[in-house]
Amino acid sequence: MTRKEFLANSTAGLAAAPALSSAQQSSGARPKNVLFLLSDQHQPLALSLLGNRHARTPNIDALARTGVRFSNAYCTNPVCTPSRASILTGLHTHNHRTWSNATPWPYEIKTMAHHFSRSGYISALIGKMHFVDAQTHGFDYRLDFNDWYQYLGPKTKLYADELGRANSGSGLPINDDLWRDSGDPWIGTRTLDDRKGSVHIGRPSLIAEKDHFDSFVARESVRFLRRFGKQHPFFLISSYLKPHDPFMPPARHAAMFQASDMELPATYGKVNLDQVPAEIRRRIERDAPNPEVQDPALARQRIAMYYGNIAHLDECIGQVMRTLRELDLEKDTIVLYSSDHGEMLGEHGLWHKFVFYDPSCGVPLIFRVPGLTQPGALCQANVSLVSLMATLLDLCGISVPSGLDGESLAPLLREPARPHSQPVFAEFALRSKSARYMLRDGDWKYTFWVNDTPELYHMAADPKEMNNLALDPAHRAKAEAMKAQLFAWHRPEELA
């Protein structure tokens, strides 16, 4: 199907969508609600449920114990805006054309919010989505960073100080166009600190806990549930910034973690620099946003403050989940938790995201579907967040438009151990000299770099991705076969 045909089908599907599905109309049943808890930059193994002694995630753990956890879930693009566009549209980056954090989402490509709204739901987005421009993309009810700034008033300067620079990934500005003509209005007014790069290594925040963005998102999500939860079927995305930068948790959460207690990852300082792409080597040798992480003590400080962010995030999620119970909405509400991408957090000596190693491209993914999912179930299949749109529409009895790149995960939710052999694809920095593409198929992962060294890992034998088999003559045939499979899915424009 061509892109033009998909867009025509998608628009036609919206126009023909009934207020309720025929099954819902005939049964007289209210549709299932959806509560999508979405974080930013949550490394997939940073859960106490998985034995991570630093992670304090009792509320996310509780959700996993009452639903299905996917242990091999991947984002489609390890950076905010393109990944979120895939989540909401069910398309990979080369199809939704949101190339980077600076690219507005194409208006004509409809999101799951459009489909839920046309099916009788009130659709709500509370928190971060990184839309880049002023489009609402189908949401009936929306609060974001700009509403938080209205709440903060003069205290917004504390946040501008913590960021230290313009950073749309952290929501200042939320829309690049607003500062494009006249520049950053905070220049000359910020209280600067001693950071060596563009991002602070991490410290306790000077913002009161109740005033943090994530606290605001939790409160407003609770307000939405109390106002609309009993009246209308709802599709609510409660979307948090943490644990994304700034790694400046509230003072109470920062005090829970000490740098001296943190261990550096087993792969820190252990990568064979002759085996990896040149870009990886450069980033290991010097992390431009955080040059301080070359000092192991400061690297531990950054890790400690990341876990402080996660602890605060988890408490905010717990607040929303408790409200769902108090309102007796649990039995009627699908709940899922995920993140737009992960965080390297020192693995391989790398920080932030942008790469296809599992700590960066992998994400936590947990579903609880009343009457369907088995408590505490584990699904080890390789799955992609591009499937979330098809999955949620399917679970709610809403027609799934043709032409999506992801298929519904409902069969895996019913039978988590069922065979599933679909490959997973991801992309980054498309239409640039640094473009790269990833294929995970079974136990194998292959990454093609347009202008750099390819990578091939056997994930069962080498889960830390330390032995690049693409350079081994004994595995040349496997690398070439996976490259051909990747190009059959999408041949990079840079090579066309």
Image: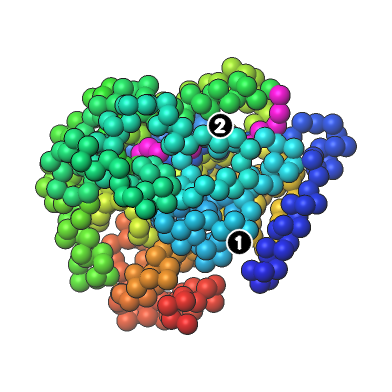
Q: Is residue 72 above or below residue 319?
A: below
- Tag 2 secondary structure: loop
Q: Residue at x 77, y 31 (%)?
A: 30
> Image quarter for residue 202?
top left
Q: Which residue lies furthest to the front in this view?
A: 182
In the rendered image, residue 226, in percent from the top left (x then y), is placed at: 60, 20
Q: Distance between the residues labelled 2 and 1?
A: 29 Å
Q: From where the camera sits, is residue 289 visible?
A: yes
199 on left or right of 47: left
Q: Residue at x 32, y 60 (%)?
A: 465
Q: Which residue is drawn at 43% across and 81% down?
A: 495
Could you tell me what secondary structure mostly forms the magenta stretch?
strand
Q: In this view, does 488 lie above or below 461?
A: below
Comparing 66 with 408, the one in front is 408
Q: Are marks 2 and 1 in contact (CB under 8 Å)?
A: no
Please tell me which of labels 2 and 1 falls first in the chain: 2
Say which mark, if any, is on residue 66.
2
Say which mark, if any, is on residue 64.
none
How dense is the environment of label 1, judged by Cα within 10 Å: few (below 14), some, or many (20 and up)? some
Q: Residue at x 34, y 23 (%)?
A: 209
Q: From where the camera sits, is residue 44 visible?
A: no
Q: Which amino acid does label 2 sit on?
A: Thr
Residue 273 forms part of the magenta stretch: no
Q: Give the range drawn in magenta.
A: 231-243
Q: What residue type is labelled 1?
A: Asp
> Image quarter for residue 39?
top left
Q: Residue furthest right?
A: 26
Say which mark, if any, is on residue 405.
1
Comparing 56 with 205, the one in front is 205
> Image quarter for residue 470?
bottom left
